């Protein structure tokens, strides 16, 4: 029998998580230069459209179908086109329609792909990005979701991390954030540095957009974490409070580092701290106490604030700090469970600091590193294959002119029209040349 309360909560949570992708588009869009804002947002919206279709066709089946590969992937034909799932059936947990679970997991797949785009801002062809998104979701995200989220049932065998390794990942520290962060690093290496990286100013062009995006991400993340309880119950309540606590602590941790290091606490730092805290508490929100959540959050804010500078020291161009925030934050949050988990929390496991020894810690480390290695290596292969065939990176001239104009024939800000005689038509050759000559001027 359908539990209408739980069903309402899960469908609401799914809508909240779906809103996170437009929120991410605003967050990323504000962080790039004015000439790239539309492309940056389009990469998120493109992922939303494409992954939704693939999820219906075979993505759900690969992620949650009966295992066909020693815990590595589900049967892609079992629920092809979501066949057989529209009947009035509920999940094994009881009371939740299967299609509600299908919808909830779909939005996780969408935002995971969209997250990667921040690592390659300003320089990737949109068509090539869409090809990459489809391939990556198919051979990386869907199988990894099976590893982490598909639990054994009476009539189904799930993934190896969830059932054999028994690492805790409540809402996607491995499958979403480590996965996307490792992929972002791989793509940044494949595409190379932006023209002028480390030399020219590449400041965010619209910080209010960044703040709005961060606010929408924080709002939607309550569906991301508390919704992963798959019921309107105590576990969801604990996850909700822990999500609030960790995120707030992470903002303070990030701002403190900025103040000590740079002398200023910035709005960009506050927005970035929000995301760092959300990332870190995602896997741990059912396993730690509220005090543990504060510790997870403040350390995430400090670690990620320090990690975003690694790209300059190590020489890779992760444009919007997907590595520094999602990979580092996801690793910390996943491994922190091994230290800070308490049996009083819904996950009912003690970590090292609560007398549990290293048993849960080694499981968390193995799960995190397995996803990192798999995602990084496979993404490198996919990225190089696309670059060598259809090409992934823009030409230098097109990058200087601006990807919005070149690829989408649009501009995010049509200032000329304010004077009454402006045109929204694509830039002609002379105007493009003028744009190249004024490359040093940033919006």
Image (cartoon, rainbow, N blue to C red):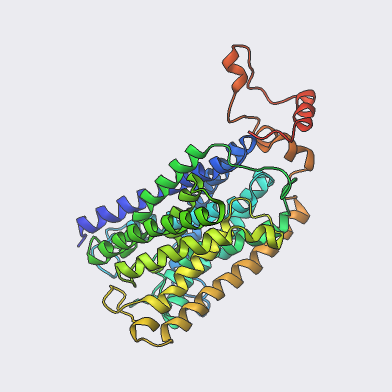
Residue 127: x, y in percent?
66, 45
Quadrant where the N terminus is found in the figure = bottom left
Is residue 264 in view?
yes
Q: Nearer the viewer, residue 7 or 119?
A: 119
| Residue appearing at x 39%, y 74% in the figure | 151
Q: Would you identify the image quadrant in which residue 333 lies? A: bottom left
Quadrant where the C terminus is found in the figure = top right
Residue 392 in the image: above or below residue 154: above
Q: Nearer the viewer, residue 427 or 355?
A: 355
Q: Would you identify the image quadrant in which residue 352 lies? A: bottom left
Q: Nearer the viewer, residue 111 or 35?
A: 35
| Residue appearing at x 41%, y 78% in the figure | 339
Residue 49: x, y in percent?
51, 46
| Residue appearing at x 42%, y 56% in the figure | 252
Q: Would you identify the image quadrant in which residue 64 lies? A: bottom left
Residue 425: x, y in percent?
66, 22
Residue 195 in the image: above or below residue 243: above
């Amino acid at each position: 029998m359908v539990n209408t309360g739980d069903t309402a909560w899960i469908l609401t949570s799914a809508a909240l998580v779906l809103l996170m992708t437009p929120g991410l588009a605003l967050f990323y869009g504000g962080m790039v230069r004015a000439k790239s804002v539309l492309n940056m947002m389009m990469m998120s919206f493109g992922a939303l459209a494409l992954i939704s279709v693939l999820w219906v066709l075979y993505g759900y089946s690969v992620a949650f179908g009966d295992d066909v590969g020693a815990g590595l992937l589900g049967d892609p034909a079992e629920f092809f086109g979501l066949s057989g799932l529209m009947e009035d059936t509920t999940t094994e947990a009881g009371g939740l329609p299967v299609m509600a679970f299908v919808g909830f997991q779909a939005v996780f797949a969408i935002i995971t792909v969209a997250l990667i785009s921040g690592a390659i801002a300003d320089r990737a062809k949109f068509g090539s990005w869409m090809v990459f998104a489809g391939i990556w979701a198919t051979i990386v995200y869907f199988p990894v979701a099976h590893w982490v989220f598909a639990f054994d049932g009476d009539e189904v065998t799930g993934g190896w991390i969830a059932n054999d390794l028994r690492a805790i990942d409540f809402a996607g520290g491995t499958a979403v954030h480590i996965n996307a962060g490792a992929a972002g690093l791989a793509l940044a290496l494949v595409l190379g540095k932006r023209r002028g990286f480390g030399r020219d100013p590449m400041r965010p062009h619209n910080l209010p957009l960044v703040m709005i995006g961060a606010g929408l991400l924080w709002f939607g993340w309550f569906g991301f974490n508390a919704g992963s309880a798959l019921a309107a119950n105590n576990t969801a309540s604990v996850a909700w409070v822990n999500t609030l606590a960790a995120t707030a602590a992470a903002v303070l941790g990030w701002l403190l580092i900025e103040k000590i290091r740079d002398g200023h606490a910035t709005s960009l730092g506050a927005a970035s701290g929000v995301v760092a805290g959300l990332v870190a508490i995602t896997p741990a929100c059912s396993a730690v106490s509220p005090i543990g959540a504060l510790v997870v959050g403040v350390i995430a804010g400090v670690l990620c604030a320090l990690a975003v500078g690694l790209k300059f020291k190590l020489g890779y161009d992760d444009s919007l700090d997907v590595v520094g925030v999602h990979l580092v934050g996801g690793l910390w949050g996943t491994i922190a469970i091994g230290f800070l988990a308490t049996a009083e929390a819904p996950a009912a496991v003690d970590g090292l600091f609560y007398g549990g020894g290293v048993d849960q810690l080694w499981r968390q480390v193995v799960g995190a590193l397995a996803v990192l290695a798999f995602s990084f290596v496979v993404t490198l292969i996919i990225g190089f294959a696309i670059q060598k065939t259809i090409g992934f990176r823009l030409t230098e001239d097109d990058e200087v002119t601006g990807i919005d104009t070149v690829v989408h024939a649009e501009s995010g800000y049509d200032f000329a029209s304010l004077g009454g005689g402006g045109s929204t038509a694509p830039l002609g050759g002379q105007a493009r040349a003028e744009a190249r000559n004024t490359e040093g001027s940033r919006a």
